[in-house]
Image (cartoon, rainbow, N blue to C red):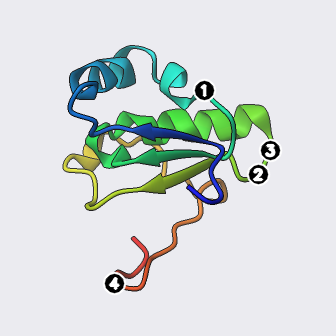
Amino acid sequence: MQIAKSLLRMDNPEQLQQNLNMAQLNPSRLLSGYTPRLIDEWQLAPKLWDAMRYEIDRRSEPGQFILTGSSVPPDASEILHSGDREICLVGNADHEPV
């Protein structure tokens, strides 16, 4: 968390179900926090993608979110927007960009 100012771990066992429910009911609540906000394992709740895109447009500020995860979303059909021009994907030493 060297760059991020706040952190959400979607896969935290003590909060996993609560996080998944919140991603469905009120995703902007999960996105609130100091920015850039690191959201680890975001792909567990694919609807966060569209919520982030909306927040990025609404806030009109670069560098709002840092997304990390170990896989792609299991159901990409839940993602409505490509994120083109709002979201930049980067890979790491072991993986290519998505």
The disc at residue 94 is: 4
| Image quarter in which the N terminus is found | bottom right
The residue under the point 39% across, 70% down is 98
Whether residues under marks 2 and 4 lie with C-beta atoms below 8 angstroms apart, the answer is no
Indicate the quadrant where residue 19 lies.
top left
Whether residues under marks 3 and 2 lie with C-beta atoms below 8 angstroms apart, the answer is yes
The residue carrying pointer 4 sits among few (fewer than 14), some (14 to 19) or many (20 or more) residues within 10 Å by Cα, namely: few
Q: Which three-letter amino acid code belongs to the residue tagged 1?
A: Ser
Q: Nearer the viewer, mark 3 or mark 4?
A: 4
Mark with earlier residue (2, 1): 1
Question: Dot 2 lies on which element?
Answer: loop
**Residue 39, position in %: x, y?**
46, 44
Q: CA distance from mark 2 to mark 1?
A: 15 Å
The disc at residue 62 is: 2
The disc at residue 32 is: 1
- Please tell me which residue lies in front, 70 or 50: 70
